[in-house]
Image (tube, grey):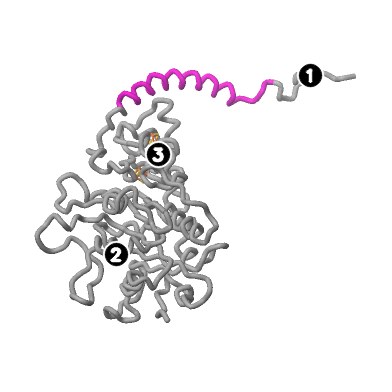
Amino acid sequence: MDAPTATTAGPAAQDDAQEDPTVHILWINAGLSCDGDSVSLTAATQPSIEELALGALPGLPKVAVHWPLIDFECGPVEGADNFVEWFFKADRGELEPFVLVVEGSIPNERVKPEGYWCGFGDDPQTGQPITTSEWLDRLAPKALAVVAIGTCATYGGIHAMAGNPTGAMGVPDYLGWEWKSQAGIPIVCIPGCPVHPDNASETLLYLLYQAAGAAPMIPLDEELRPTWLFGATVHEGCDRAGYYEQGQFATEYGSPECLVKLGCWGPVVKCNVPKRGWINGVGGCPNVGGICIACTMPGFPDKFMPFMDEPPGGHVSATASGIYGSVIRRLRNITARTVDKEPKWRGRSEELTTGYKAPW
Ligand code: SF4
Ligand code: SF4
């Protein structure tokens, strides 16, 4: 009988012996990262992590979430209340099905003669740390699905910048872009620095419904992102897009106008944050005055630096938009003045001037 797991698992973790299989979510935040994606998920509302963990949505399978951020298990290695024990169980094939969530980029452990870059728990046999990449080697082949959460885990992110000493990479670089789980599911990438809270929780929800047989194969684009979340650009969902189209550009922060001249990469970045808002529909980088630095993109950060400069191409398109926009703005001003007035026939005259013609 499994020991009860943390509050995050709710009653579900005790149901291994019952008929409905519990889907375990094993979350490793031991890649190179700031844990920002874990922190981000605590702000999710569509759905919230509580709704996921407690199975509070119709049709959800029973779920047990093993997530270091809020798990209270802290017993000794090989003890029943040891958090890492769930990962050993999965490795021994005693925990099925499970979804493996990886947070943080994977350093290349082969590029040095000794030591390790990052790890998670100790090997009881040797007393030595188990590296994060070894956990991936052990657990990925047994997982129902592997989810890379945040830009570090998906594409390498900040740690994988030119000049880094660790040879860091994303999960698809480590396992292979064509890798598929035993259930035939490719690696699911949810980029963002940090990941958008609801993009993370909604993707996990989708996979849980897929595990329950209630959803088809998750649709992913070439960079392994859920298509319904990353199919449009920041620009297409930005509150300031109207200013761009009219050629009105901010030259300093605090303006409501388009931020492209301040360094916004929104026109070429796939991200739904301005459309979705950041927390509970509120916020979203350019909507609230921050330039888009392209944090969801595989080329982040190297291909988008220096961040505060006008993007290449931005000058040409902004100049074209400026010329076109000034003409359009003048014409719109004429139209706007016209439609900003009531029709002339409304008033207290003795005569009916609406154009009505009596049919008799
Ligand atoms: S602020 Fe950025 S995303 Fe918004 S309209 Fe301007 S260029 Fe596009
Ligand atoms: S709008 Fe840009 S900076 Fe903001 S989350 Fe999306 S990609 Fe990142």
Place of residue 246 in the rendered image (x, y in percent of width and height, measured from the top left): 43, 25
> Quick one: label 3 or label 1, which is nearer the N terminus?
3
Q: Which residues are magenta?
A: 315-344
Q: Which residue is mark 1?
A: 351
Q: Position of residue 113 (x, y in %)?
A: 9, 59
The amino acid on which the numbered mark 2 sits, given as a three-letter code, is Arg
In the shown orientation, is residue 204 left or right of residue 129?
A: right
Mark 2 or 1: the one toward you = 2
Q: Position of residue 205 (x, y in %)?
A: 48, 58
Label ID, residue 138:
2
Determine contact: label 2, label 1, CB under 8 Å.
Answer: no
Q: CA distance from mark 2 to mark 1?
A: 88 Å
172 is within the stretch colored magenta = no
Please report contact status of discs 3 and 2: CB closer than 8 Å, yes or no: no
Asked whether 339 or 346 is in front, the reply is 339
Q: Amino acid at mark 1?
A: Glu
The CA distance from mark 3 to mark 1 is 54 Å
Query: Residue under circle 3?
Result: 234
Q: Quadrant of ligand 2?
A: top left
Respond yes or no on whether mark 3 lies under 8 Å from ligand 2: yes
